[in-house]
Image (tube, rainbow, N blue to C red):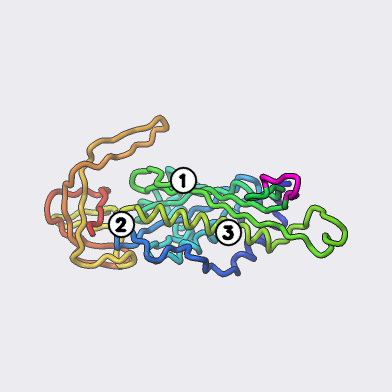
């Protein structure tokens, strides 16, 4: 039985907003990142692949996943409203596809964007774990299952850093009436569906965090003047005066069948040092080499 009913799905999302976002070790305290600087990411509205309710569902799902990710101190989540404002100011059509999302992400100094979809929300009957080996002794139980899928895409290169899935599952318990009148297909309550979706979002957020832990920090050069350069990141991500950055040469450009071009970094071509840090911009001194606007500056721990 498919549960894709907009009439109850939207209330479930509202209900989930009130659920506690504290979990059992989701945010992996003690697990380190490749960089001391915060990684900037944005979660785009999730694609409603199974027809649950359109734009409101897509934005609410992204917002709830964002709330989980925002608990991770090494991640700086750029709200969708900020991306939407940039899109409107620059007449970029909505919804964003992967190419336009990367363009906007680069302009806002993001390290990655997350493109997700709601792929499954079902009620089904099954035997779990060891019970499936004893078909004649145990009847199938009713479950609610939810699956969310997402890909984390590097803003600079367009490479998919990780294709992740988050799943949730809740067994429906028989009511007292079922015990007296015999088993029947249980009625699904909104709280049960909300809890299942919440588990799927928690699982997906956990997987996204694991991907970002292995991602190097990088910013983008917006302007160059003499022996100085500006990158579009600053105090908000933790940059301090004296920190070092490097710009790599291009070893190779690879274009795939879809026309997307990927850059393979070569040896370092320039070294830079932060001299003046503002909230969303940093002035760098070019210590050696040459730098051009649009190039990528990698943080050197």
For marks 1 and 3, the one nearer the N-term is 1
Q: Position of residue 125 (x, y in %)?
A: 72, 48
Quadrant location of residue 257?
top left
Residue designated by label 3 = 199
Name the outermost residue toward the right. 181
Read off the magenta span: 132-140
Relative to 92, 106 lies left or right: left
Mark 2–mark 3 CB contact (< 8 Å): no
Q: Position of residue 207 (x, y in %)?
A: 46, 54
For marks 2 and 3, the one nearer the N-term is 2
Name the outermost residue toward the left. 288
Relative to 227, 233 lies left or right: right
Relative to 301, 15 lies left or right: right
Pointer 1 local density, CA inside 10 Å: few below 14, some 14–19, many at least 20: some
Residue at (34% x, 66% y) in the render? 236
Relative to 281, 134 lies left or right: right
Q: Position of residue 85 (x, y in %)?
A: 46, 58
Q: CA distance from mark 2 to mark 3?
A: 28 Å
Quadrant location of residue 41?
bottom left
Q: How many marks?
A: 3
Vertical side of 21 occupied by 215: above or below: above
Residue designated by label 1 = 163
Quadrant location of residue 228?
bottom left
Residue 243 seen in render: yes
């Amino acid at each position: 039985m498919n549960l894709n009913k907009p009439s109850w799905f939207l209330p479930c999302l509202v209900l989930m907003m009130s659920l506690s976002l504290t979990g059992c070790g989701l945010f992996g305290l003690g697990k380190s990142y490749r960089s001391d600087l915060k990684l900037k990411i944005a979660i785009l509205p999730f694609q409603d692949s199974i027809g649950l309710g359109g734009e409101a569902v897509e934005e609410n799902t992204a917002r709830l996943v964002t709330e989980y990710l925002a608990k991770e101190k090494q991640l700086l989540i750029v709200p969708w409203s900020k991306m939407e404002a940039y899109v409107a100011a620059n007449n970029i059509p909505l919804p964003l596809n992967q190419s336009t999302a990367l363009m906007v992400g680069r302009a806002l100094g993001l390290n990655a964007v997350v493109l997700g979809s709601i792929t499954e929300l079902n009620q089904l009957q099954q035997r779990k774990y060891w019970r499936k080996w004893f078909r004649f002794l145990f009847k199938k139980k009713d479950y609610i299952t939810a699956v969310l899928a997402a890909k984390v895409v590097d803003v600079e290169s367009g490479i998919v850093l990780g294709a992740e899935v988050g799943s949730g599952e809740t067994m429906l318990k028989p009511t007292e009436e079922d015990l007296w009148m015999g088993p029947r297909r249980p009625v699904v309550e909104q709280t049960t569906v909300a809890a299942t979706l919440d588990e799927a979002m928690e699982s997906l957020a956990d997987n996204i965090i694991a991907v970002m832990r292995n991602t190097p920090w990088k910013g983008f050069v917006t302007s160059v003047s003499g022996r100085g350069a500006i990158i579009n990141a600053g105090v908000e991500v933790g940059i301090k005066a004296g920190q070092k950055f490097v710009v790599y040469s291009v070893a190779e450009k690879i274009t795939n069948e879809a026309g997307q071009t990927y850059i393979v970094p070569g040896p370092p071509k320039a070294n830079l040092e932060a001299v003046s840090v503002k909230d969303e911009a940093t002035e760098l001194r070019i210590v050696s080499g040459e730098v051009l606007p649009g190039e990528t500056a990698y943080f050197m721990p």
